Each structure stands twice: as C-alpha cells, then as structure tokens.
Image (tube, rainbow, N blue to C red):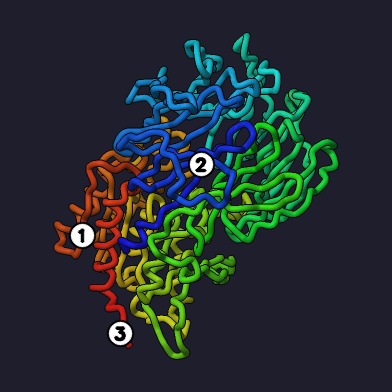
Amino acid sequence: MEQLLNVHRASMPSPSSDGSVVAFLSDIPGLPQPYRVETRALPAAESTYQRILEVNERIHFVRFAPHGQAMFFGRDHGGDENVQLLRATPLGAPIVDLTAQPAVRTMFGTFSDDGRWIGYATNERSRGDFDVYVRGTVVGEPRRVLEASGHFEAWDFSGDGRWLIASEEHSGFNNELHLVDVAAGTRTHLTPHQGDARYINARFSRDGRTLWVLSDVGRDYLNVATMSLQPGVPTFVLDESHDVDAMEFSRRANVLAIAVNVDGWHQLRLYDASDPAHLRALTPVDLPPVVVSSMEFSEDGRWLVLGAGRASLPDEVFRVNVQTGHAERVTRSDHAGIEESSLVDPTVERVRSFDGLEIPVLLYRPRGMRTGERAPVVVWVHGGPEGQATPSFSPVIQFLVGHGYVVAAPNVRGSTGYGKRYAHLDDVALREDSVHDLAEVNRWLRTRPDVFADRIAVMGGSYGGYMTLAAITLYPDLWAAACDIVGIANFRTFLERTAAYRRALREAEYGTLARDGAVLDRVSPIHRVDRITAPLMVIHGANDPRVPIGEAEQIVAALRARSRRVEYIRFENEGHGIARRENKIRAYGDLIRFFDSVMTVGGT
C-alpha cells in the first residue's frame, strides 16, 4: 500500500502563453503543490520539475495569467476548503495573499483576454452567499460587480473585457446564466426556464456576440449549444447520445474542445468553430482512452493541455497539437517502481436492478485468476451523489486487486454520466432506491463463480459513505464488512451543520428539513443502527466543512454503546477526505488489515 501511495501524480495543468512552459499540481511532497516544467524535451522526467511554491497546505489550483503577467494559486488550511487567492509573477517574486481571510472561501473564475483582470467569487459578505468580484491581476483593489443572495460564480470575460458571464448555482443539475456589465455592475438574466436545466462551461464566441455552452435544457444529455446575449433558449449544434462532460474554447484559434463521456472514459474531440451552426471536426486526437480531469488552451491557441489518466495510468499532463491532433505526454512522474503494465483496468458489466433498470458496474479482477478460483469482493461506492465511478487510477483499488480482492464500482441510479433522467432517479423520497441497487449488485456478485458469496464488503466516501451505512442497515445480511469515509449518518444534523454556502445546494438534492424532514429521518442510517451487524471502519477529518465530523462521531458512539465492532480513525489536520500522504498510508493500511481480518484473503 505504501508503495502505491508513493506513486506521484500530475494534474490540473495551465500552459504559458505560447505553451513553452506548463504549470501543474503534483503530490510529490505528500499533498498537492505547484510545479512547472519546460516543454522542450518531452516527456519531462520528474527530476526536471521546478517547484513554484513551498507551503505545508494543500494547493487547489495553479494558473498562468495571459501574457505571463502573473501566476495565481489557491490554498486552504487543514482541509477546511476556505481557499485563499495567492499571486506571484512567474519569475519568482514574493507570494502575495490577495484575500487573507481564513474564514472566507474564494472561488477562482477567469482572466480577461488581455491579462489585466481576474473574475472570482467569495462569500465574504455573507457565509451563505457568493458574490462576484473583479480585480487587477497585478494592481488594484477588488470591486464587487454582482451582489445577490445565492451562489454565483465567475465564468468568462468577453474578448473586449466589457462583459462577464456569471453562473447562479441552484443544484448540481440546475443553474442560471447572467450577463454582467463589468463597468456598470448591472446584469441580464439569460436563461429563464422551468424545472432543472444546466448551462455550463459558458464561453464567449470569438466576436463576443454569442456564447458557447453545454446544456441539457429540453433533453437528457449535456450537449454543445450556442446562445445569444439576450434571454432565450440555446441552439444545439451537436447531438451526442452521451453527456459531454467538459468543453473549452480558444478564441485565438476559434477551436472548440470537448470530452464525451462513454461509461466514464472520455473521447476527446476538436472542432473548427468558424461557422457555429456547422462545427467542422478537426483531425482526430491520437490519445488512448483516458479520463480527462481538466483541459486548457494555450493563449496562442496552438496547444490544448490536459490532465488525464486511467486506472492503469496514474494522472499525468498531456498536450495536444491543435492542428495535427497529435497528443504527447508532458510529465513522467515517479511511480515508485510500479510498472503501468502491472496495474488493472476494469471491464464494464451491466446488472439488472429490482425494477429492471440496468446498472453499470466497473469490475476490477486480480490478474491471473484461474478457472475455479474465488476471491472476496469490495463494492466501492462513489461520492456525490452527483458523481460517477470512472476508470481512474486509485491506489487503494489497485492494492485491493493486487492483494487478491475483486473490486466492483457501480454507478447506481442517481449517478452522473448517464443523462439527466438517470441522475434524478434517487431524489428525496426515492433515496433508498439507489441502496436497493447496491443490494442487487451484491446478489449479482454472489452468482459469479469467481466470488466468495459470503465475503462481500462495501465502502465509500462522502455520499458513498452514506450509501455504505444505508447498505448495512437496510441489508445487514448481505455485507461481511464496511468502511465509511467522511459519510453522512444523519441527514438532519448534516443539513443543520454543513457549511452555510453548501446548504441550499444540498437541500436541492436531498430535500429540506421543513418540507421533507420525515423522509430525511426515514433514510438516515443513524435511526437503524440496531440493524448493523457487519464490522465497520469509520474515517473522518476534523476540519470537514461538507460533512462535519459529528456525523462520524454519532455512528461510532451508537455502535460502541451497543458493543458492536467499529474502528475509528480521526484526523485533526484533514477535511473532506484524506489529502496528506502520511495520513493515507495510515488510513488505508489499517483499512486493508481490517478487511483482511474479516474476510480472510487467500481462503479456498
């Protein structure tokens, strides 16, 4: 486990104006920190990475400003997610803390094309609301250009800097776009609609008269559309039968890049956007199937830089030549002596649930299993619920598989990546239908000749932690062991105590205490704790702003009062999840020993 957790990864790249330098995050020191590398000889070995900033806190992003005038970073403290905005010139001038408000969360947004301005949002005025600000990249004080109740984010400046697109977030499946006059501070609501609809990744066109946007208004899947700068509906220009997860636009090159989600893998495509009504596909990108985590064009439009990987390839930085479609690896991080060929990619299986719905499952099997051999199983439930199990590199999954376990990662109803209808099948009173899906996955696994039917565990983080607790309370006889990482035990206390800026977004998914309190109590595992018989491990960070530590404390105290087996790891310097390598080594090492003690790997 320690060897796999020492596999270094590179992610969230940002190219310089001409793409000759790429800044990115790497976990070399044990938690994400910013580095840069020159692109003259690729792939660049880790020994050539240059560390930009040295702090003992997590860095959330690093971005080059246009024209190389400055570099920006986001940093929190102890995992509290109150990100602060830092600035430096690329040549190593002293770091300036632009926000310096540890109790305030800053959400970086965008740069103006001339590199003079940044747009971002903070909850400085009210902890439950995010206002939009503009300030100079090098000099000048912040100026609030949009103040309102709700959660707003800054997305894109028009080419001339006159306009700023802001998104008003209602939930993971519903948002609005507003056109902000930067000088006047006035706004126009562009997307009046009924019901849930998404308008995401909005980018101004080259001439500034229209917007490129991903939307699912009036349809099931997110697709590429254009919009005018007046209130109205989008005009779709692509009609994919899958969600388009991400889109970026180069105004200089007039090129659009999209990532199409097919069972969690991404197909990367480039289009000439000269005629918005008739996108022209450019040369196909020669990139193998990967999961794209981020992408950004260089300012000159020549390069598209990606953070990407797959289960058998820990995340690295890639770049694509926009004209030729040729993709090459930018970084070659230290993988602690582990060969990529020794890692396992999943297959995609389909399981019929209780009502006939088909549930996709990513299935990881140990290499070299012979006919007649059986293995214990860990069912790995993703977070969210607006999330998806994807074939990304996970050191824990790879260790489990290498250690003799089968790992099944289902995308139960409510998961993203399969359209809007599928994502809404677990809303509010339907919450436990997704738990019934887990039971059906368990029963399907029991029919397989390569599985020990009585050795199936369940684990997950965040919402996956809730699903884990719900599974062992609703179906106690099906599960041999469980692990809850930063999960919800009690929806009532969770909604009362989660960070103020998240409450409205979470209520849109789970329901409100005033209207749906009875449902929320019914589906909360804490009220069925007597039914838990499976040994349980609980892992949580004391600084978690999303799912406060009280959720773990409740479930642990309730089980200990009943003399049930529960093991608890609390980290004082972590938030929502485990970011520091030394903590991962402890937590996941203990987890494997816990599962082994219950399920006896190697039995016949």
Mark sitting earlier along the chain (1/2): 2
Mark sitting earlier along the chain (2/3): 2
Is 143 on the left or on the right of 402, as rendered? Answer: right
Residue 307, given in percent of the width and then of the height, sits at 55, 48
Q: Secondary structure at mark 1?
A: strand
| Residue identifier under label 3 | 603
Task: In the displayed orientation, state which residue is furthest to the bottom.
Answer: 372
Q: Secondary structure at mark 3?
A: loop
Mark sitting earlier along the chain (1/3): 1
- Using a 10 Å C-alpha cutoff, classify the residue at mark 2 as few (fewer than 14 neighbours), some (14 to 19) or many (20 or more): many
Q: Label 2 vs label 3: CA separation?
A: 48 Å
| Residue identifier under label 1 | 567
| Residue identifier under label 2 | 37
The amino acid marked with disc number 2 is Val
- Using a 10 Å C-alpha cutoff, classify the residue at mark 3 as few (fewer than 14 neighbours), some (14 to 19) or many (20 or more): few
Which is closer to the viewer, label 2 or label 3? Answer: 2
